[in-house]
C-alpha cells in the first residue's frame, strides 16, 4: 500500500525558516509529481507547490513564490519543502500528495495524501 508521511513541522518566528519532509513508500516514486498543500483552520486546502516526477521542474502558488522551494531525492523517496521568510499567514497544516498528472495544482488531481504536519509561525 501507498504511504506518505510528513515530518519537520513546528513553531517558528516570523521571518524564520523551516524545512518539512515527506517520505513515500509503496509507489514508483519517480513517476509521481509531488505536491504540497496547506490548510488553515476554517479554510479550504490550498495549493502550495509541486515538483514533477523526474524533471528538474517545480512551480508554486503566487503566495509562496520566492520564499518556498520544493526539492526531491528520488533515491530516498523523499520530497522537501524549504520555507523561508515565514509569515504568520503561513500557519497551517502542511500536506504532501502524489499525482500522476502532468502539472497538478488541484486537490482533485492527487491520488495519495499524507496526514499532514503542523507549521505555526508566531508574530
Image (tube, rainbow, N blue to C red):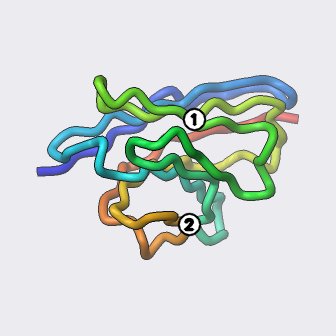
Q: Residue furthest left?
A: 1
Q: Quadrant of the C terminus?
A: top right
Q: Nearer the viewer, residue 85 or 72?
A: 72
Judge whether 116 appears above or below 102 on screen: above
Picture residue at 60% right of the left edge, 29% below the top: 10
Picture residue at 64% right of the left edge, 61% below the top: 41
Picture residue at 44% right of the left edge, 35% below the top: 79
The residue where tag 2 is placed is 105
Is 52 situated left or right of 114 in this image? right
Cα–Cα gap, marks 1 and 2: 16 Å
Circle 2 SS class: loop
Q: Residue furthest bottom?
A: 108
How far across and how far down the image is residue 71, in percent? Answer: 53, 33
Tag in front: 1 or 2: 2
Q: Residues within 10 Å of mark 2 (few under 14, many from 20)?
A: many
Judge whether 60 appears above or below 84 on screen: below
How far across and how far down the image is residue 30, in percent? Answer: 30, 42
How far across and how far down the image is residue 83, in percent? Answer: 69, 33
How far across and how far down the image is residue 47, in percent? Answer: 61, 61
The residue where tag 1 is placed is 81
Circle 1 SS class: strand
Q: Residues within 10 Å of mark 1 (few under 14, many from 20)?
A: many
Picture residue at 36% right of the left edge, 54% below the top: 98
Amino acid at each position: 500500500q501507498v504511504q506518505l508521511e510528513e515530518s519537520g513541522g513546528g513553531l517558528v518566528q516570523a521571518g524564520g525558516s523551516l524545512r518539512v519532509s515527506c517520505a513515500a513508500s509503496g509507489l514508483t516514486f519517480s513517476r509521481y509529481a509531488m505536491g504540497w498543500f496547506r490548510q488553515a483552520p476554517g479554510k479550504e486546502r490550498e495549493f502550495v507547490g509541486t515538483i514533477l516526477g523526474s524533471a528538474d521542474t517545480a512551480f508554486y502558488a503566487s503566495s509562496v513564490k520566492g520564499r518556498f522551494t520544493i526539492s526531491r531525492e528520488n533515491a530516498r523517496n523523499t520530497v522537501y519543502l524549504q520555507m523561508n521568510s515565514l509569515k504568520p499567514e503561513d500557519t497551517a497544516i502542511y500536506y504532501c500528495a502524489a499525482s500522476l498528472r502532468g502539472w497538478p495544482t488541484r486537490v482533485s488531481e492527487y491520488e495519495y495524501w499524507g496526514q499532514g504536519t503542523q507549521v505555526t509561525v508566531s508574530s
